[in-house]
Every structure is written in C-alpha cells, then in structure tokens.
Image (cartoon, grey):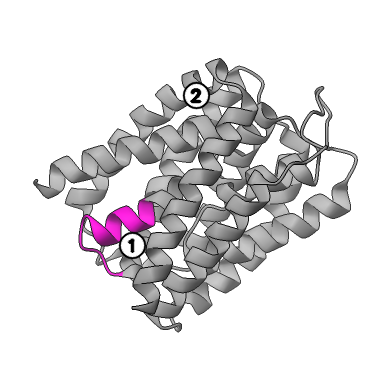
C-alpha cells in the first residue's frame, strides 16, 4: 500500500478521534507516522503537532458553533500550559528515542485507566460547569502543557478526562473545550521545534492533514449522536491498545 493511501487512511482516523473525542489525535498520529509511514520518533512528534494543530482548530470551530466550548475554563487551561509546553519542547530533542516512546506509552495508558474508572463527577451540566475552580484548571493545564512539549502530543487525551473529573464537565463540553487547549499547547510546542520542521516530509503531512480535517467534521457529527459515556469508554480502550503496542516496541 502506498504512503499516500496510508497517510489518507491514518489522517481520517486521527481526525475522527479529534472531532468526536476532543483528543487522541496525537496519540494515534505518532504511532501511525512511526509504524506505517517510517518516521523517526522525533520527526513523528513534530509532524503530529503540525497535523493536530491544524485539525484541532478546524474541529474547535465546529464545536464552538454548537456551543460545546467553555471558553473561560479552556483559556485558563491553555494559558497555564503555554510556558511549560515551550520549555519541554526545547528539552525533548535531547532525550533518547526509546525513552520518548516509553514515556508516551505510559502516559497514554494512565490516561486510559483514569477514564475507565467510574467517577461521580461526569454529570455536571450548564454553561458555567467547572469554571469556579481556577486553581485546579491552572495546575492541570500546566501539567498538560509540559507533556505536550515533551511528547509531541496536543494533550487532548489527558485534557478530556481532566475536564470531566477535575472540573466536572459533561463529556460533550469536555470534548469541545479540550480542542481549545490542544490548539494552544500545540502551537506553543511547535514554536520551539522550528528547526525540526525542515526535515518533515510534506508530501505525507499534507494529505494526512487534509484527511484529518475532513474526519474531524465527521467526528463532530458522531459526537452529537453517541452518548458521552460510550465515547469515553471507546476512547479509553483505544488508548490502552496503542499504549501496549508502543511500550512493547520501546522495551524490545
């Protein structure tokens, strides 16, 4: 199968995850770029940030139109993570590739387990749900920003469970708001990786990104039809599978 077809298929899946789940784009894009398209882990993390930044901005617009975005809490999350994302992004190039891969797998697995555990805080609703906890939002946002810069992820696969469990957002609001966080963190991390974008294969990244954008719109429509709990479980199971594959690869 040609690289172009693989890029289109992988891009569509990444976009679907971002549009429907508000995260998971990077955690799916990185292994796809490494194992399907032959990127090195360092190049894959940079390329995934480019793909996820563009796609998440598109998905954010779609969710904002149906008022799924909690702008105040999302902006606080994003602002707290900007400096940590930039600093960690600068440090990422100095770490060995197997360490980055293993760390990526562990973080993804922890996020999945957290989402699978029952929580009594997933039913909060209303336009201001979660916005009365600025300290928790800022602290969690800083941690997400650091992971974005270090591992080349947008942070949505952690932002969604954080918004659900820490700020008591309902799943739909968490999905929409996480896209704001992803966009800001990814842009901050890319700012410190400027030199590494030179070697990125744009003939692969272009089609990958275009397919992801189209997939994100389909994902947004899917999110409107499927219950939040089903989305959450599906997201978590997918994360566990990806984490297992990457951890085996890092340790072998």
Q: Residue at x 43, y 52 (%)?
A: 241
The residue lying at 57 percent from left, 67 percent from top is: 86
Circle 1 is placed at which residue position?
Answer: 44
Is residue 156 placed above or below 98 in the rendered structure?
Answer: above
Identify the mark at residue 220; answer none if there is no mark.
Answer: 2
Say if the magenta span includes residue 169.
Answer: no
Location of residue 246 in the rendering, given as x and y in whole percent from the top left corner: 39, 64
Mark 1 surroundings: few (<14), some (14-19) or many (≥20) residues within 10 A: many
SS for dot 2: helix
Give the class, few, some or many, for how many residues have Cα within 10 Å of label 2's Cα (few <14, many ≥20).
many
Q: Which residues are magenta?
A: 29-40
Is the C terminus in the top left, top right, bottom left or bottom right quadrant? bottom left
Where is residue 217, by image quadrant? top left
Queried whether the magenta region covers residue 38, the answer comes back as: yes
CA separation in Å, label 2 and label 1? 25 Å
The image quadrant of residue 39 is: bottom left
Q: Residue at x 64, y 45 (%)?
A: 116
* Left or right: 67, with 140 as reference point: left
The residue tagged with tag 1: helix, strand or loop?
A: helix
**Disc count in the image?**
2
Left or right: 136 with respect to 223? right
- Residue at 54 percent of width and 15 percent of height: 225
Q: Is residue 210 left or right of residue 239?
A: left
Q: Where residue 173 appears, x then y in whole percent? A: 68, 29
């Amino acid at each position: 199968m040609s690289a172009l077809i693989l890029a289109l298929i992988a891009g569509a899946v990444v976009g679907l995850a971002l549009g429907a789940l508000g995260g998971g784009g990077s955690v799916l894009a990185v292994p796809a770029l490494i194992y399907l398209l032959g990127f090195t882990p360092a190049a894959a993390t940079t390329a995934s940030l480019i793909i996820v930044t563009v796609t998440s901005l598109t998905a954010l617009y779609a969710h904002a139109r149906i008022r799924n975005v909690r702008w105040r809490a999302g902006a606080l999350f994003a602002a707290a993570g900007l400096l940590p994302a930039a600093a960690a992004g600068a440090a990422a190039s100095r770490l060995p590739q197997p360490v980055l891969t293993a760390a990526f797998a562990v973080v993804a697995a922890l996020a999945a387990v957290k989402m699978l555990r029952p929580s009594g805080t997933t039913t909060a609703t209303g336009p201001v749900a979660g916005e009365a906890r600025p300290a928790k939002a800022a602290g969690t946002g800083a941690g997400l920003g650091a992971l974005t810069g270090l591992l080349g992820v947008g942070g949505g696969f952690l932002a969604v469970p954080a918004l659900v469990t820490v700020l008591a957002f309902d799943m739909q609001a968490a999905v929409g708001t996480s896209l704001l966080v992803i966009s800001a963190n990814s842009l901050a991390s890319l700012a410190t990786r400027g030199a590494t974008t030179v070697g990125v294969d744009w003939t692969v990244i272009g089609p990958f990104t275009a397919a992801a954008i189209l997939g994100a719109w389909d994902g947004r429509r899917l999110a409107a039809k499927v219950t939040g709990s089903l989305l959450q479980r599906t997201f978590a199971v997918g994360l566990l599978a990806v984490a297992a594959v990457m951890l085996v690869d890092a340790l072998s």
